[in-house]
């Protein structure tokens, strides 16, 4: 009898403990005590409106907690504590506190902190994942918050840029990197010094690249060849119409002229890319690691012993310091394959800033962004600190006192074309190209389209497995195209790719019915 | 007959087969030892090499273009941080191990006494946590919101302070002590606390050392609790600093980082990665040969019946 009673008591204690952990989401967490007016997400993740709490009284300084990827440095801590926060406190009544999570664990930790309703006020993520974040209820509607708190920011973000943060008609994020971006990831960033060293001057086609690799293998045997299979630039080179990747990673593309969704692996362009890459392997120009460690392409390029990597506008300036630390004479230049084909602006940058439902000071987060984008002086202050300390401005260029200075806030995260000031090592030619890069570019029909995968999640898992196991080696040219392609396509069909494409097309049609076509 | 001849006569003569087996064993164990030692040697060698040469020529067991530049750079840039993290690691290892031994040995001792009231229920609760876990987020909420461990040194110590597996290991040793010993102590007027402290613990010294070693290694290698709870970099233990250095590399390899950000992530050089590894594993590597015999002793205790 005693044992039974004891067992019952234990069970009761366990159940009670479990319920204690399941507190309501809108209750403050134990250590916070204070009240919050931010409402928890509704189950449909859709139309929850968030009141913009501004609990601070005039003169009071509120704290804004930002989840930030990377490693904390002493220089950054000193900058925030001694330079940024005093200014923020005085000018907008806030202080920022950064919670750093290393790159490797950033996404896992973000999920833990947001699911545990930790009071994070602002966080960064990749813009392509915005729809997933909305589905996971990790970001709240910030439309009204922006209107109320960000008048200065709105002056330097065109409406078309902010539209990239809209899902189901609701503003869930701020696409924070606003810069010329047509043909994003369709460029190829090459070692210009080696290119000239082998007697070539420029790259225009895939054949030029192959010729470059062949000559470099002969004349620079210490180099390791290309760092990347550059399937996106090659797709631009081989495609009859330009494609924009719009769903399921690299599996679904949108034809900008036919206005239809396709499985990328069934397109003629993919077949040509795969055959080109296979010929590169056959000629001994690719190393196996391009397939086996595909994701390390950027780090390979930064080692200074590789010839090219997939590029984006300005990438050569972003990575040149790393390359030169290995090879001081290195020069980089980005080229667009098939330069006469149409250029499309396919995304509102790659970054997005979001406010989670657990934010205690969402208005403060918006105030911080508004302050940052209020003036070029504030913008540069956040990136480099006060003028004169780490940098000076000469002839409209930033001259860093220490060329190795890495800056404070990530430039790529907050990039804004209205305030961008290049460093003195960037060439005039590049600046000229940068400023006119989007001239004549068309806006992609799917620039603000976010695919909702809720109805096809199971199919997505099956397709991803086939893509990773069968199509990645084919795409890289690692396996023979002729003998493996048909079987791989059949597996993809069995996994449900047709159903998936139909779902994407359906959502695209709905999207176009509301927003129309851009061209 | 002199002494040498006596010794020769008493020596066990090995047959040819014995010699073959012995020779094979020596070669086999040597190969395994070299296979284990070689990567470590490589790490040390790369950390003492010039990075540009390593990038071009790859790793080597002998330093290429020998230089101490990486260590100089590391200590000049992060010397304070490394020194501080050493103190944190040593402190949490010492305090954590002592605390864990105290808690574990007490509960093990108590559960080894068959007359203990609710003994089975307590054992069941402990067992239950091995089989069923509430999951990461509830655990985080409990530690963070209820125990308020966020950004405290206690967060590095308390969550790892009690291991059920170690408790059961220790209980087995405590159970092997004859109960009559405790009964005679009780007759002499000893309290349970005195029995635990003055009789049980000294009799199970080897087992205590073994379990203590497991706890100490766990605390020395601690990084998970830092990742979950510590925001202030001044509280980072050594292993978490190493973890952070490697984090960028792993993130790039995983493909999780969006392309725009990936191109901008600064990667540590190969020599830097190896130097950080040497700095963090160095002390425990040198200490290990002196303490490993206790592992062997501990595991062997009770294995031989005579």
Image (cartoon, rainbow, N blue to C red):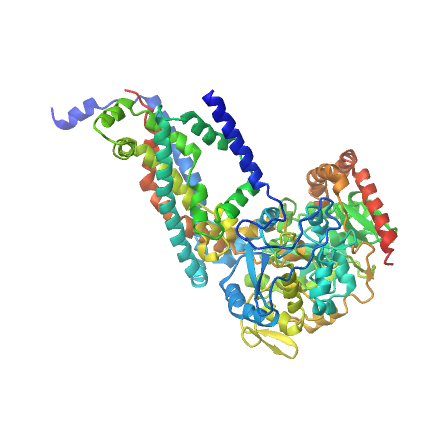
Q: Percent position (x, y) of residue B150?
A: 49, 51
Residue that protrudes farthest toward the left in the picture: B1
Q: Position of residue A438 (x, y in %)?
A: 78, 65
Q: Is residue A438 left or right of residue B274?
A: right
Q: Is residue B62 above or below residue A390?
A: above
- Residue A432: which quarter of the image? bottom right
Residue lying at 49% horizontally and 33% vertically, measured from the top left: B129
Q: Residue furthest bottom?
A: A395
Q: Please say if A58 is above or below A473.
A: below
Q: Decide if residue A268 is on the left or right side of residue A308.
A: right
Residue at horizontal 51 percent and vertical 69 percent from the top: A82
Residue B15 is situated, as x and y percent measured from the top left of the image, at 31, 21
- The location of residue A39, given as percent across then percent down, is 67, 51
Q: Which residue sits at x=37%, y=33%?
A: B107
Q: Nearer the viewer, residue A360 or B26?
A: A360
> In front: A138, or A407?
A138
Instruction: State the image quarter where residue A123 is shown.
Output: bottom right
Q: Is residue B188 left or right of residue A104?
A: left
Q: Quadrant of the C terminus of chain A?
A: bottom right
Residue A507, placed above or below residue A64: above
Q: Is residue A203 visible?
A: no
Asked whether A86 or A345 is in front, the reply is A86
Depth check: A150 or B285 in front? A150
């Amino acid at each position: 009898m005693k044992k039974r009673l004891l067992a019952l008591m234990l069970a009761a204690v366990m159940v009670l403990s479990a319920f204690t952990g399941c507190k309501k989401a809108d209750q403050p967490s134990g250590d916070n005590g204070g009240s919050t007016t931010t409402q928890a997400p509704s189950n449909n993740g859709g139309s929850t409106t968030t009141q913009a709490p501004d609990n601070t009284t005039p003169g009071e300084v509120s704290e804004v907690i930002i989840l930030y990827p990377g490693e904390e440095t002493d220089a950054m801590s000193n900058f925030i504590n001694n330079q940024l926060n005093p200014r923020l406190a005085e000018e907008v009544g806030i202080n920022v506190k950064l919670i750093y999570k290393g790159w490797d664990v950033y996404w896992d930790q973000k999920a833990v902190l947001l699911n545990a309703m930790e009071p994070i006020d602002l966080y960064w993520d990749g813009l392509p994942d915005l729809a997933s974040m909305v589905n996971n209820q990790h970001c709240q509607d910030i439309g009204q918050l922006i209107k109320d708190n960000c008048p200065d920011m709105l002056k330097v973000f065109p409406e078309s840029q902010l539209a990239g943060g809209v899902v189901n008609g609701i503003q869930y994020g701020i696409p924070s990197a606003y810069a010329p971006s047509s043909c994003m990831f369709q460029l190829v960033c090459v070692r210009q010094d080696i290119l000239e060293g082998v007697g070539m001057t420029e790259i225009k086609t895939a054949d030029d690249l192959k010729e470059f690799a062949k000559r470099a293998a002969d004349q620079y045997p210490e180099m390791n060849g290309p760092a990347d299979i550059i399937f996106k630039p090659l797709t631009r080179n081989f495609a009859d119409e330009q494609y924009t990747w719009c769903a399921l990673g690299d599996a679904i593309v949108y034809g900008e002229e036919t206005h239809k969704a396709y499985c990328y692996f069934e397109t003629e362009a993919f077949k040509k890319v795969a055959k080109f890459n296979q010929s590169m392997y056959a000629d001994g120009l690719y190393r196996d690691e391009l397939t086996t460690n595909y994701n390390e392409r950027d780090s390979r390029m930064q080692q200074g012993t590789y010839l090219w990597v997939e590029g984006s506008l300005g990438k050569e300036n972003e990575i040149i310091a790393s390359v030169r630390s290995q090879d001081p004479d290195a020069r980089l230049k980005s080229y667009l394959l098939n330069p006469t084909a149409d250029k499309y602006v396919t995304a509102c940058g790659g970054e997005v800033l979001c406010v989670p439902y657990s934010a205690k000071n969402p208005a403060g987060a918006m105030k911080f962004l508004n302050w940052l984008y209020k003036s070029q002086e504030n913008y540069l202050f956040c990136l480099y600190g006060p003028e004169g300390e780490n940098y000076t401005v000469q002839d409209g260029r930033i001259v860093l006192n220490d060329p190795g200075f890495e800056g404070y806030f990530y430039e790529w995260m907050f990039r804004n074309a209205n305030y961008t000031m290049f460093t003195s090592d960037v060439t005039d030619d590049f600046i000229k190209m940068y400023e006119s890069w989007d001239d004549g570019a068309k806006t992609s029909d799917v620039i603000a389209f976010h695919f909702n995968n809720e109805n096809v999640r199971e199919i997505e898992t099956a397709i991803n497995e086939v893509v990773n196991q069968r199509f990645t080696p084919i795409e890289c040219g690692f396996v023979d195209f002729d003998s493996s392609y048909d079987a791989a396509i059949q597996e993809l069909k069995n996994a449900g790719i047709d159903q998936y494409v139909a779902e994407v097309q359906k959502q695209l049609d709905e999207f176009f019915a509301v927003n129309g076509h851009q061209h | 007959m002199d002494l040498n001849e006596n010794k020769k006569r008493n020596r066990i003569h090995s047959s040819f087969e014995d010699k073959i087996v012995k020779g094979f064993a020596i070669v086999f164990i040597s190969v395994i030892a070299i296979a284990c030692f070689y990567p470590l040697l490589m790490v040390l060698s790369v950390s003492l090499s010039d990075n540009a040469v390593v990038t071009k020529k790859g790793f080597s067991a002998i330093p290429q273009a020998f230089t101490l530049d990486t260590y100089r750079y590391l200590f000049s840039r992060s010397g304070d941080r490394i020194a501080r993290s050493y103190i944190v690691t040593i402190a949490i290892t010492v305090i954590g191990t002592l605390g864990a031994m105290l808690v574990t040995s007490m509960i093990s001792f108590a559960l080894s006494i068959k007359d203990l009231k609710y003994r089975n229920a307590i054992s069941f609760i402990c067992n239950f946590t091995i089989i069923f876990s509430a999951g990461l987020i509830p655990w985080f909420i409990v530690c963070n919101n209820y125990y308020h461990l966020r950004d405290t040194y206690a967060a590095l110590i308390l969550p790892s302070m009690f291991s059920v597996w170690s408790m059961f290991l220790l209980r087995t040793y405590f159970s092997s002590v004859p109960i009559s010993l405790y009964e005679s102590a009780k007759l002499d007027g000893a309290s349970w606390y005195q029995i635990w402290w003055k009789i049980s613990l000294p009799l199970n010294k080897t087992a205590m050392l073994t379990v203590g070693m497991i706890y100490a290694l766990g605390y020395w290698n601690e990084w998970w609790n830092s990742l979950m709870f510590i925001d202030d970099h001044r509280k980072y233990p050594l292993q978490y600093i190493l973890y952070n250095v490697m984090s960028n590399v792993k993130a790039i390899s995983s493909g999780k980082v969006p392309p725009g950000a990936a191109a901008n992530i600064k990667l540590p050089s190969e020599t830097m990665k190896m130097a950080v590894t040497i700095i963090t594993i160095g002390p425990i590597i040198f200490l290990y040969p002196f303490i490993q015999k206790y592992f062997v002793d501990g595991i062997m205790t009770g294995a031989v019946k005579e």
